[in-house]
Image (tube, rainbow, N blue to C red):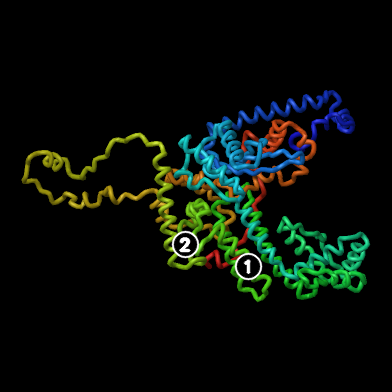
C-alpha cells in the first residue's frame, strides 16, 4: 500500500490510519515507519533478484532501453532507465531497472551510469537506446557503444544504437511553429487571460455562458510558453465559448478597452473577432494531429516501432497543407516546422543520417507492408526516382542485418544426406549397378539433375519473406497483432523471427522513463526527495514492478487508442 499509493512511511503512525485498522483488524499490530522502510527495501531486493533471473533465463532476445534525467526540488540529479523487451511468450514488456542519482548531467556521467546499471543487471545485449536530443546524450551513447564493443554485443558496429525520441522532436517542430503564432491566437489568449484574472470577471463570463446556454464540461485554461500542447488545450476550450466572449463586450465595459490597450510588436491586439475564432479552429486541427501523434508515440502497452512511418508521412502531409494555406500566419508556421523536420528527419529529399534506420526495418517486418509501404511514402515525399534509390539502400541494410543474425543463430545438428533414388524396377536397379551396357534407359528421368535445386539458386529467408504476398488485415489494422503473426510463423522464418522480436521492442519515445518525473510533485514530492537515493530507487522501481506483476509480467502502460487512417496521402488509396 505504501509503495503503490506513494504514501510516506509515517502514514502508519497517523491517528486516522490507526483508528481505521482498529476497526478493520483489531488484532493486527501496526509496524512503525522504520520497520515499513526496511520491509519496503527488502521487497525491492527480492523483486530485483527475481527480475534479474528473468533476464538471464526467460528474456527471449535483446533489450532496448529508454533513459531520461531530472533534478529534484533539493537540487539532486536523478536518472531513470527503463528496459523494453519482447519475452518468450511474445508479449511486450517494460520494466524500470534503475532510478539512480547522477553526479551531473554531463554525457560521460550519464554514460557511466548506464553502463554501471547494465553490468549490475547482467544485461549486456542492448539493441537501442532512446534519448532526447540533448548533446550530452550523444556523448553517453558513444561511451555505451564502446563498452558494448568490448562485450561483443554491438549490433552492426552500433549503427542502430542511438534512437532519438520522436515525442521530443515533435515538440521541437511544433514549438518552432508556434513562435510564428499569428495575431488571432494572441487575441484569444489575451481574452482568456482577462476572464481568468479575477473572480468577478469570471462570474460575468459565466453569466454570458448561461445566457447562451452553452453546455460544456471544458473550462478556460491558460497556456504555458514551455508546453505547446497547453496552447492546443487553451484554444480547444476557448472556441466553445465564442458567443460568450462576444457577449462579454456588452456585459463588461472594461473588457474591450483593456484588451485594445495591449500591444504586440507595436500592433494593437484587441478582442477576438469572428475571423479570429475561425483561424483558431483551423489551428486546432493542425495542433490536434501533433497532439495525437505525441500520445501515439508515447504508448508503451503495444508495439509502436512499425507504426511511425505512417505518422511520418502524415507529418509531411499536414505541413504541406500549411504551406499551401491562404493564411500567411499558417504558411509561416509551416515553413518553420518544415525547417525543423528537415533538420531531424529529412535532408534534400532523402534520409537524414540522424534518423535511425530501425524505423524502416520495423515497417518491412510488418507482413502487411514489407518494402511496399516505405516505397509508397518515399514516392509521396521525394519522387519515384529517389524512392527507388532509398528502397535499394534499405534492402542493403536489411541484408546486412539479416547476415548478422544468421551468423549468431545456433547451427542445427547435421542430418544424414538424402540420396535421390530413381523409381525403377528392381531388375533395372540391379542392371544399373552392373556393367551391363545394353540396358534399356528409356525409363530414366534425364531431367532429374536439371530440376534439383542448385547452390546458387537457394533463396534466403529474407528473400522468401519479401517475395511472399503481403498479409491482409481485413480492414481492421488496429486488431492485427504483429507479434502474434511472428509467433505463428517462427518455424517458417526462424532468423527473421529473432530480428522481429528485437526490432518490435524498440520504444519510439522516452516517455516510459519520463513518466517517473512527469508529475514531479506527485512522484518525487518533498517527502521522497528527502529520502536516501537508494530508498527512492527502491520505492519507484518496486512501484513499477508491483503494478505489473513480477510473476506474470503483464505489460503496464497507456491504453492504445483507435487511430483511424484518415489521409489518402499515407494510405495509398
Residue for badge 2: 375
Q: Which residue occupies the foreground of this view, 9 or 536?
A: 536
Image quadrant in which you'd find residue 408: top left
Task: Point out residue 86 in the picture as x, y percentages from the top left corner.
Answer: 55, 42
Q: Residue at x 83, y 32 (%)?
A: 11
Q: Residue at x 77, y 24 (%)?
A: 35
| Residue at the extreme front | 266
Q: Residue at x 47, y 40 (%)?
A: 154
Q: Which residue occupies the foreground of this view, 310 or 491?
A: 310
Q: In the picture provided, is 546 more to the left or to the right than 200? A: left
Q: Is residue 562 visible?
A: no
Q: Which residue occupies the foreground of this view, 506 or 526?
A: 526
Task: Point out residue 73 in the picture as x, y percentages from the top left corner.
Answer: 77, 41
Q: How many marks?
A: 2
The crowding category of the residue bearing disc 2, from other C-alpha atoms within 10 Å (few below 14, some 14 to 19, many at least 20), is many
- Mark 1, secondary structure of its residue: helix
Task: Point out residue 39 in the picture as x, y percentages from the top left corner.
Answer: 73, 26
Asked if the residue at tag 2 contacts the one at tag 1, i.e. Cβ–Cβ closer than 8 Å, the answer is no
**Cα distance in 3D space between marks 1 and 2:** 25 Å
Question: Mark 1 against mark 2, which lies toward the viewer?
Answer: 1
- Say whether disc 1 or disc 2 marks the residue closer to the N-terminus: 1
User: Does residue 214 sit above or below 153 in this rendering?
Assistant: below
- Mark 2, secondary structure of its residue: helix
Image quadrant in which you'd find residue 110: top right
Residue for badge 1: 334
Q: Is residue 408 visible?
A: yes
Q: In the picture provided, is 412 more to the left or to the right than 33? A: left
The crowding category of the residue bearing disc 1, from other C-alpha atoms within 10 Å (few below 14, some 14 to 19, many at least 20), is many
Q: Residue at x 46, y 46 (%)?
A: 489
User: Does residue 554 sit above or below 238 in this rendering?
Assistant: above
User: Does residue 346 sit above or below 42 in this rendering?
Assistant: below
Task: Point out residue 506 in the picture as x, y percentages from the top left corner.
Answer: 55, 47
Amino acid at each position: 500500500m505504501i509503495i503503490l499509493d506513494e504514501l510516506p512511511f509515517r502514514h502508519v503512525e497517523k491517528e486516522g490510519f490507526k483508528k481505521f485498522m482498529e476497526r478493520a483488524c483489531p488484532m493486527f499490530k501496526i509496524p512503525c515507519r522504520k520497520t515499513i522502510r526496511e520491509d519496503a527495501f527488502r521487497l525491492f531486493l527480492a523483486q530485483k533478484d527475481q527480475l534479474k533471473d528473468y533476464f538471464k533465463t526467460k528474456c527471449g532476445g535483446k533489450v532496448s532501453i529508454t533513459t531520461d534525467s531530472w533534478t529534484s526540488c533539493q537540487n539532486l540529479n536523478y536518472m531513470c532507465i527503463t528496459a523494453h523487451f519482447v519475452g518468450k511468450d511474445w508479449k511486450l514488456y517494460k520494466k524500470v531497472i534503475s532510478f539512480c542519482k547522477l553526479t551531473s548531467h554531463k554525457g560521460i556521467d550519464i554514460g557511466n551510469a548506464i553502463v554501471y546499471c547494465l553490468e549490475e543487471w547482467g544485461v549486456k545485449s542492448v539493441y537501442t537506446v532512446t534519448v532526447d536530443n540533448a548533446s550530452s546524450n550523444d556523448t553517453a551513447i558513444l561511451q555505451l557503444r564502446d563498452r558494448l564493443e568490448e562485450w561483443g554485443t554491438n549490433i552492426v558496429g552500433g549503427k542502430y544504437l542511438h534512437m532519438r525520441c520522436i515525442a521530443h522532436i515533435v515538440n521541437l517542430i511544433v514549438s518552432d511553429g508556434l513562435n510564428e503564432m499569428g495575431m488571432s491566437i494572441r487575441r484569444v489568449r489575451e481574452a482568456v487571460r482577462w476572464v481568468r484574472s479575477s473572480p468577478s470577471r469570471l462570474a460575468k463570463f459565466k453569466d454570458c455562458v448561461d445566457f447562451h446556454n452553452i453546455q460544456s464540461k471544458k473550462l478556460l485554461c491558460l497556456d504555458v510558453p514551455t508546453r505547446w500542447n497547453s496552447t492546443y488545450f487553451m484554444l480547444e476550450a476557448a472556441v466553445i465559448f465564442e458567443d460568450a466572449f462576444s457577449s462579454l463586450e456588452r456585459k463588461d465595459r472594461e473588457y474591450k478597452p483593456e484588451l485594445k490597450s495591449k500591444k504586440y510588436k507595436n500592433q494593437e491586439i484587441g478582442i477576438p473577432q469572428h475571423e479570429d475564432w475561425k483561424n483558431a479552429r483551423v489551428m486546432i486541427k493542425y495542433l490536434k494531429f501533433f497532439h495525437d501523434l505525441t500520445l501515439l508515440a508515447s504508448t508503451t502497452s503495444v508495439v509502436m516501432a512499425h507504426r511511425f512511418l505512417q505518422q511520418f508521412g502524415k507529418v509531411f502531409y499536414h505541413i504541406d497543407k500549411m504551406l499551401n494555406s491562404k493564411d500567411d500566419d499558417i504558411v509561416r508556421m509551416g515553413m518553420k516546422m518544415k525547417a525543423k523536420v528537415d533538420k531531424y528527419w529529412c535532408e534534400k529529399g532523402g534520409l537524414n543520417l540522424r534518423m535511425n534506420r530501425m524505423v524502416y526495418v520495423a515497417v518491412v517486418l510488418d507482413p502487411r507492408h514489407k518494402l511496399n509501404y516505405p516505397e509508397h511514402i518515399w514516392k509521396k515525399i521525394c519522387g519515384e526516382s529517389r524512392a527507388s534509390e532509398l528502397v535499394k539502400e534499405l534492402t542493403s541494410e536489411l541484408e546486412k542485418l539479416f547476415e548478422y543474425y544468421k551468423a549468431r543463430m545456433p547451427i542445427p545438428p547435421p542430418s544424414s544426406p538424402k540420396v535421390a533414388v530413381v523409381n525403377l524396377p528392381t531388375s533395372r536397379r540391379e542392371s544399373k549397378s552392373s556393367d551391363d551396357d545394353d540396358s534399356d534407359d528409356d525409363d530414366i528421368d534425364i531431367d532429374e539433375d536439371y530440376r534439383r535445386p542448385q547452390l546458387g539458386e537457394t533463396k534466403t529467408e529474407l528473400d522468401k519473406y519479401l517475395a511472399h504476398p503481403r498479409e491482409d488485415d481485413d480492414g481492421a489494422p488496429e486488431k492485427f497483432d504483429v507479434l502474434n503473426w511472428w509467433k505463428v510463423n517462427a518455424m517458417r522464418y526462424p532468423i527473421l523471427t529473432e530480428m522481429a522480436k528485437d526490432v518490435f521492442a524498440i520504444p519510439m519515445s522516452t516517455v516510459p522513463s519520463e513518466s517517473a518525473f512527469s508529475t514531479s510533485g506527485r512522484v518525487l514530492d518533498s517527502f521522497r526527495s528527502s529520502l536516501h537515493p537508494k530508498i527512492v530507487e527502491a520505492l519507484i522501481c518496486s512501484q513499477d514492478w508491483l503494478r505489473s506483476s513480477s510473476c506474470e509480467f503483464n505489460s503496464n502502460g497507456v491504453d492504445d487508442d483507435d487511430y483511424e487512417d484518415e489521409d489518402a496521402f499515407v494510405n495509398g488509396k
